Image (cartoon, rainbow, N blue to C red):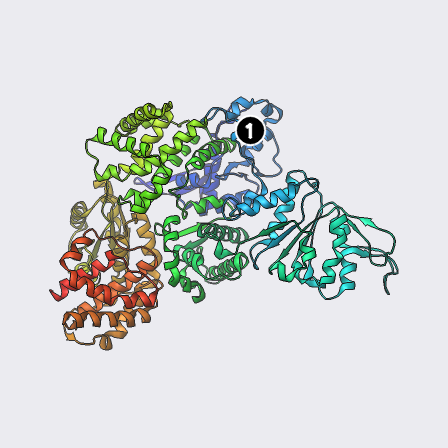
Amino acid sequence: MNYGKVKIGGFTLGDYYFKGDGRHKLNRKEKVYEKLKTITRTLKINNDSYRDEVGFDAGYIAKMLNISRNNVSKELNCLLNEGKAIKILGKPVLYLDKIYIESKFNIIIDDPIIANADKLKKLIFKDSFDNLTKENSNKILYEEVSDSNKIRRSVFDNIIGSDDSLKKQVNQAKAAIMYPPKGLHTLLIGPTGTGKTTFAEVMYRYAVEIGKLKPNAPYVIFNCADYAENSQLLISHLFGYVKGAFTGADTEKKGLVDQANGGIFFLDEVHRLSPEGQEMLFTLIDRGKYRRLGESENTRSADILIIAATTENPKSAILGTFLRRIPVVINLPSLSQRSLKERMTLICRFFRDESSKIKEPVTVQKEVLKVLLLYNCPGNIGQLKNDIQLICANAFLEYVTKQQDSINIKLSQISYRFKEGLFSIDNKREELTQNFNLNDFENITFNGITESLDDNLKDVILYDEYKTEEDFYDLILKNAQKFYNEGFSTNQIIENINKQIENRFDSTPSKVKNGGETKADKEVILKIVTPDIIKIVKDSLIETVGILNTSYEKVVYSLALHIETLIERLKSGHIVIHPNIQKAYKDHKNEYAIAQKIKCKLEEKSSIKIPDDEVAFIATFLYSVNMKKEQGNIEVLVITHGYATATNMVQVVKTLLGYDCIHALDMPLEEKAEVALEKATSIVKKIDKGRGVLLLVDMGSLTTFSEIITEKTGIPTRTIRMVSTPMVIEAARKAMMPNMNLDLLVQSVLNTSYLIGEGVKVNNSAAKVQCPHLIYEDRSINMLEETLTFLNVKKAHKTLSKVLEKIALACNKSIDEIIYIKFLFHCSCMIERVIRNEPLPYKKIREIKDTKKNLYNIIKDSFTLVEEVFGIIIPDSELAYIVEMIDTHFNL
């Protein structure tokens, strides 16, 4: 049986098996398997090549076959179940052809799911594998790390917030377990749903982990509410009873205390125990002694550590004499007391868990994540988990009943009680901006089978700019060791670490990248960074480039913060090896010259020798963060068949939004495609501002223009078919967002297109009316409902109509349909942007405030109604656009 492609006239028709004189068209799974077999045979695995690759991930195979990664992953798991593939767990998950590996190495693999690359090699090479030296296992990107720098992980590290809001609680719990000789009894306090039961179980697992308890030590849970009001039943259940203790006691029975002997006894809802019930435990707690029900003389012993939990104030709900016997009290915070970053981590974990249960990826819109971050969740973590389960269940139901291609969770599927949180966004605005990257992507896919929680979090959580960078360097070392353990080749490790470095410096907060650090920012940094270091950085930049312009000024404090940490690290003897110094020098010579200048000045000032590796890091920093050419926004080009079709569509959108980023090209029906292509290419060259052009087309040959234009010009372009006026509106307003990129814009418009339907024709007649909303209300509301994502349209319509009337009255002008629709449309979109914390920038705010002072004050005063109704603060940049719109239309 042979495998190949059929070609006719230079065109590939498809993949086939050739068998004899016939042929069989390959389905998707067969294509994936054939490719897996082929690439597995290219792999060289021997007991000397410890760092060689040992498999191929789904993304690599997907790229080779031009099939989506999710589909390839699905087929690989089918092959796994059929016994044709080996799955090597790790990050990423790798696959091999099982039949070939078994034949090649003369082995039988009973379990095709292998924990890691090491396990596979041990299976293949058996004892010879163990002869590898420890020295070889440590020589990757850095010299041997001392044991003092290695951090031992514990089960507590799996608790979200263990290094942040729960750090104190975790340390208390560890101390309670470790305290000699047998630990300290502990009381957990916190509202319902804060994770007390989970925390208690982790304490038990920690005791086993450190050897305080045997691996098979019991962990017994007792809910005190079950027997709260019946003392006799409580005694018999806790301590057991002897034969004849009461009518029906025909045999002796052990109690929960017997079962918990040698382990941990968890008393949940301990406040539900009556005072008598609490007193029953005194002797057990004090002396480890107890009697079964019906015993009068015989005393039994129990070696038990008690962990109790309550949702109530212990001083009022629990006896003081009982509390005095519990030396450790741990208070677990409510969800509202924890940071939004931790809440996002919880949200991502719960979505991953649901994906794992469903065994399918779950794609979630960014607005859903924002809603879940902000909504009132009185039931804390427990309620958050249940709410996410319910959301996923509803999405899964749609996926099954409507036979959808994937499980998608959109804002439109979320009930109003969640969305109410968006209107309290003002209270969390600063924390959202500092910690989350929710404006740079439209959705995030959770795959509980093939991806880790970190894969999802890196898409939404930003780097904390004022946090010490030591964690970053530790991460480099840990990841290098991790990649090595997972079987990555040296080249792969270097490539991954290089990306990690570039991504780290690329993720410097936008306020540093964009210049204009606030006085508060500088004050914070000056508390952390030595003034001499800031001066050295400034002087070095001035001497190297001549003048300290904006492009360089904006990086001074960020770079100084980096160097402050560098010096502290060098003083403590921690040296980090750059993965490729030569590449850093070759690719970034100008930046390397600045870095060398900084090195010399630092060595003179601090008497510390700065290694060349650190110079390379500084050069990478300068290149990645500070020297990038500032670019404009994405441009949108509408191309349609017919006379003036595209032109009219663009004119309507320009009238409504007032943006200049949209352009039109009409293709008469008799015009040849080659001519239209030349025109489109010329326009793209003219309008591109460095971030690419989105082509919105109707049909036919126009859909093929994008690839040809990009190939000819090198300008990135993308195409969306079946253009409509609402689609142009959506594309235009999102193209103006400062952090938007071309692929994200395409994804965003496509995700929204099912909501916006067909365009509504706008009548451009200028018939002036005093109260146009009485005439145009239905039409304008319909238009807004087709375009807005989550805003209450009727509420916005009513409020903005009042605002416009107030502005017109103050300007002594009457309102016509053009300004009415334009104002209503622009300002509704503006409200959504502000709620999302995505305001448009305006470069000449000071100028417009000075030249149009009276109009600016009128508009600012009029929009206080909008701020009160929607609970937002409208930034000056958005008000400036409205001033410009009103001034132009009324010709003030």
Judge left or right: residue 202 versus residue 260: left
Farthest bottom residue in view: 774
Q: Residue at x 29, y 68 (%)?
A: 865
**Where, by quadrant of the figure, is residue 708 drawn?**
top left
Would residue 27 be visible to someone looking at this image? no
Q: Residue at x 35, y 38 (%)?
A: 505
Q: Is residue 180 above or below residue 793?
A: above
Of residue 52 and residue 698, the one placed in the foreground of this image is 52
Residue type at tag 1? Lys
| Helix, strand or loop status at disc 1 | helix
Residue marked by disc 1: 104
Q: Is residue 571 above or below residue 692?
A: above
Residue 400 position, x and y percent, is 49, 60
Farthest left residue in view: 891
Judge left or right: residue 300 versus residue 549: right
Would residue 327 be visible to someone looking at this image? yes
Residue 738 position, x and y percent, is 28, 50
- The C terminus sits in image quarter: bottom left
**How many numbered callouts?**
1
Q: Please rate how many residues cluster around mark 1, counting C-alpha atoms within 10 Å: few if below 14, some from 14 to 19, many from 20.
A: few
Residue 453 position, x and y percent, is 48, 46
Of residue 165 and residue 645, the one placed in the foreground of this image is 165
Judge left or right: residue 36 versus residue 438: right
Residue 344 position, x and y percent, is 45, 52
**Where, by quadrant of the figure, is residue 871 drawn?**
bottom left
Of residue 671 and residue 541, the one placed in the foreground of this image is 541
Judge left or right: residue 177 versus residue 167: right
